Image (cartoon, grey):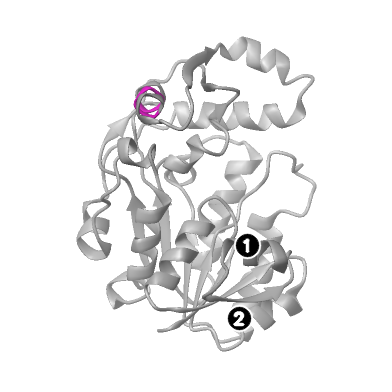
Amino acid sequence: MKKITVIGSTGMIGTPVTKELINAGFEVTALVRDINKAKQIFPTGVKFVKGDLNDKTSIIEALKNAEGLYINISTKPENKESDFNPEIEGLDNILYAAKQSNVKRVAFLSSLMARNYQGDWWVMSAKKQGISKIKNAGIQYTIFYPSNFMENFNNGIMQRKKATIMGKPIYKAWWIAGEDFGKQVAASFGTEKAINKDYPVQGLEGLNMEEAATIYVKNYTKEKFTVSFAPMPIMKFLALFIKPLKFVIQLMAVMMNNKETFEAQTTWDELGNPTITLEKFANL
């Protein structure tokens, strides 16, 4: 399997995964909304097709001659339940196109939180639906269930000279770098062991949010940051006036109630061990 199409290549985790697919020697095609922007991220190694998840024709074009497909999509904080949802209608369009294009295998990014979730928040319900859609599509699949990504520190947690922690963190997460995960995705396309397999994706050490933020801030040398705490009642009040904050608060509540245990040994054995510590990541 050498030809891989990526949907969601320019996002927080899509970017390192796509880079690792290139490094592993795959012929990569990416469906993107803005080709010029995508070329700045990937100057070489990627063929681009302009389109989006509303457009089945563009998805089919991006999947032309593809043997494998990696999907990295998510609901955004500004999305409403009544909006077109990439993880529901968008995924339906992707799977339709994959069947039309005779894609052999689909690799899908989910999350341990989604797999474990028992509540009724529509955002997490959409993620759980995505898991079912992939498994019932009639295409060979590999589903990844990651813990927290280290990239979250560079994309939301670290702002205004502070690493802000909402509420009181209790449970630990096994933080992993997108680069390490990308290597595992690339490895999965090269082995039949990954066919119709669920893989927990976890890093080297279990840390709660406060512990992780403290380590990151201590080792981040480009700027001086501090760790701050935001009481949940205050954040809920602010969310009355800042709508995207409501999404973030609900997501943080799911994270804080996700009791995670280490279960990625099989993933490491079959797809490779992670090597990047949070200390190292802070200096990348």
Crowding at mark 1 (Cα within 10 Å: few <14, some 14-19, many 20+): few
* Residue 172 place in picture, x, y as percent: 34, 29
Please tell me which residue is depicted at 68% across the width and 82% down the height of the picture. 61
Q: Quadrant of residue 176?
A: top left
User: Which residue is the extreme one toward the front?
Assistant: 222
**In the rendered image of this protein, does residue 91 appear above or below residue 171?**
below
Please tell me which residue is depicted at 60% across the width and 36% down the height of the picture. 120
Magenta-span inclusion, residue 87? no
Q: Is residue 1 left or right of residue 152?
A: left
**In the rendered image of this protein, does residue 45 appear above or below residue 264?**
below
Please identify the quadrant where the N terminus is shown.
Answer: bottom left
Magenta-span inclusion, residue 214? yes
Please identify the quadrant where the C terminus is shown.
Answer: top left
Q: Secondary structure at mark 2?
A: loop
**In the rendered image of this protein, does residue 76 appear above or below residue 139?**
above
Please tell me which residue is depicted at 56% across the width and 66% down the height of the picture. 42
The kind of residue tagged 2 is: Leu
Q: Quadrant of residue 119?
A: top right
Please tell me which residue is depicted at 27% across the width and 52% down the height of the picture. 274
Query: In the rendered image, is residue 150 in sight?
Result: yes
Q: Is residue 276 left or right of residue 1?
A: left
**In the rendered image of this protein, does residue 199 appear above or below residue 228?**
below
Please give the label number shown on residue 63.
Answer: 2
Residue bearing mark 1: 40
> What predominant SS class does the magenta segment belong to?
helix
Q: Which residues are magenta?
A: 212-216
* Residue 33 place in picture, x, y as percent: 73, 64
Q: Earlier in the sequence, mark 2 or mark 1?
A: 1
The kind of residue tagged 1 is: Gln
Q: Secondary structure at mark 1?
A: helix
Crowding at mark 2 (Cα within 10 Å: few <14, some 14-19, many 20+): many
The one nearer the camera, 8 or 195, is 8
